[in-house]
Image (spheres, rainbow, N blue to C red):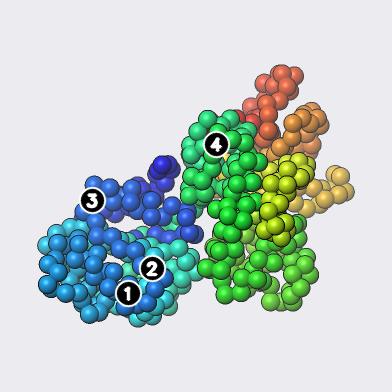
Amino acid sequence: MFVGREAELAKLESLYEQRSFQMAVVYGRRRVGKTTLINEFCRGKRTLSFTALEQSDADNLADFNRAIASFFNLPASLGGFSSWTDALSFIADRARAERFVFVFDEFPYAAMRNEALPSIFQVAIDRAFKETSAFLILCGSNQGFMESSVLGRKSPLFGRRTAQIKVHDLGFKDAAKMLPGLSAQDAFKFYGCFGGVPYYLQQLDSSVGLKENLARLYFDPMGFLYGEPEGLIRQEFQEPAIYNSILRAVAAGANRAKQIADRVGIAQTTLPRYLKALESVGIIEKAVPFGENPETSKRGIYRLSEPCYAFWFRFVMPYSSDIEAGLGQAVVNALPEEQLNEYLGHRFEALCAEWMVERAKRGELPIPATTVSSWWGTNPAKRAQDDIDVLAADRVSKRLVVGECKYRESFDESAEIDDLEGKRGLVKGYAAFHFMLFCKHDVSAATKKKLAAREDWRIVTLEDMYID
């Protein structure tokens, strides 16, 4: 099933319509849907497609030769090309006579076996492909390699790309389309535990409950997601043990640099390079209170930004020995409901921010917001620490939309409304003119009546975020 990716497809199509040489770099973590996106774009277009494998350079070149021969209907008697240079020269020559898309998937696998390959492509582009109307797509799952050896300033290919597309996980609404028949509440639970990676979502059985899917995919040694996060860590990084320990520490609640270093048992001075590497591939994110510089703020915290990793390192990794012993179902059954709800509460805050971003893109917030963030610090009125779960800011007019996120069955609605309005002036230099209360369920009739005449207030339920 192909869902979402409208912006990415539109970008590729706009380039294709220019009828000149184009080089699009498409990358993102494994299984996120890069190849599916490319296949959708190539539908109905004449396409030479090749996927490199983790094998020798000679074997990749041999496979490349077979793809060329098949695409151009070359007779077997011609034999293959003895070098990548010759093969690319032949493709460029044919591109002068006919237009086609040329997809080189998993480019890092080939380039890691032949370090000259980026330079070979650079020469082929500069001397031949630029004079054609070929549409070249270089695709890869090793994000570090793609950003340094294809897009980086020191790469021979730097400056050749006409577009770069980093493919991210699907958002809640698109992910929910892959989970037919679920209510908004259940769809969010699945999204919060499995995330928006299309291939993961395809493994789910929405006809059975959340815990049945958790047991089958996470808590079974043969389950598809049991070893997935560790496998991706091994693919991206050379010291997987340290990265695993860092992620386990963050998942367990150690969200500041000193706490993480102490939990892992490494020097705090060595921690930043590991954290930056994890940030670069989108596994964790560093957050600072809105208005502060991420580079200089002393109040920065780290959190797992990808739900699959967040769930796995929080609930699966600590019980790996029990799971290996065949007790995975028992572990799932014993998961404390309050811990699972606490975890989903954090994912709910992320969903509220996601919803705000989408509304801001469409110009559907009460202000022309250019930033969606959160804030924490001292509340002078309370003489205590306080926070704003999610906010949207108009940096020009210095106006805010401030929001509170409540993933609870019930709460004191009047108290929350008063508390949120009391945060009106917490962000220095800004004033809050609009308020949003994000709720798991709809509020009471009395609360609706109380806010009916207030143009500066909006209640947003999980159901709203599901359908809107």
Residue placed under numbered mark 1 in the picture: 59
Q: Is residue 85 left or right of residue 223?
A: left
Q: CA distance from mark 3 to mark 2?
A: 24 Å
Q: Contact, CB < 8 Å: mark 1 with mark 2? A: yes
Residue type at mark 2 is: Leu
Residue 294, relative to residue 464: is it above or below? Answer: below
Looking at this view, is 345 or 417 the one in front? 345
Q: Earlier in the sequence, mark 1 or mark 3?
A: 3
Q: Earlier in the sequence, mark 1 or mark 4?
A: 1
Residue 353 in sight = no
Q: CA distance from mark 1 to mark 4?
A: 41 Å
Residue placed under numbered mark 4 in the picture: 206
Residue 114, relative to residue 360: is it above or below? Answer: below
- Circle nearer the viewer, 1 or 3: 1
Dot 1: element: helix
Dot 2: element: loop
- Circle nearer the viewer, 3 or 2: 2
Tell me, for residue 173, which label it has, or none: none
Dot 4: element: loop
Residue placed under numbered mark 3 in the picture: 45
- Circle nearer the viewer, 4 or 3: 4
Q: CA distance from mark 1 to mark 2?
A: 9 Å
Q: Residue at x 76, y 41 (%)?
A: 337
Q: CA distance from mark 4 to mark 3?
A: 35 Å
Which image quarter: residue 112?
A: bottom left
Q: Is residue 87 left or right of residue 262?
A: left
Q: Earlier in the sequence, mark 2 or mark 4?
A: 2
Dot 3: element: loop
